[in-house]
Amino acid sequence: MQRVRDPIMALQLPPPDPHESSGAPAAGFAVPAPMAVYLNGPPSPRTERVCDAILDLRPGALIVLASE
């Protein structure tokens, strides 16, 4: 059985920003686990899947301004 993937999920992220930290967090600041903050309320299932995929590739904090 072939899985149908969301076309958005097939997109690849651009390379990391050279100033994006990939090591230890700054002193006095730590995100205990990857997290997404949805400023426009609860996300749609599709938006949540996309955010989960981004956080799988680049763990940290993700601020989401999507409007459905």
Image (tube, rainbow, N blue to C red):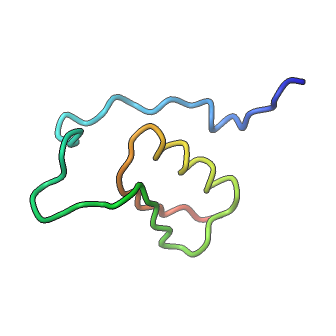
Measuring from the top left, give residue 37's x and y in whole percent. Answer: 45, 67
- Residue beneath the point at 30% across and 60% down: 31
- 21 relative to 54 in the view: left or right: left
- 18 relative to 13 in the view: left or right: left
- 24 relative to 62 in the view: left or right: left
- Residue beneath the point at 18% across and 63% down: 29
Total numbered labels placed on residues in the image = 0
| Residue at the extreme top of the image, as rendered | 2
Measuring from the top left, give residue 50's x and y in whole percent. Answer: 59, 47
Q: Is residue 50 above or below residue 30?
A: above
| 8, 52: nearer the viewer | 52
Q: Is residue 59 above or below residue 61?
A: above
Q: Is residue 17 above or below residue 47?
A: above
Measuring from the top left, give residue 41's x and y in whole percent. Answer: 57, 75
Measuring from the top left, give residue 38's x and y in whole percent. Answer: 50, 68
Q: To which quarter of the image does residue 3 belong?
A: top right
Q: Is residue 47 above or below residue 43?
A: above
| Residue at the extreme front of the image, as rendered | 32
- Residue beneath the point at 69% across and 34% down: 7
Which corner quadrant holds the C terminus? bottom right
Which corner quadrant holds the N terminus? top right
| Residue at the extreme left of the image, as rendered | 27
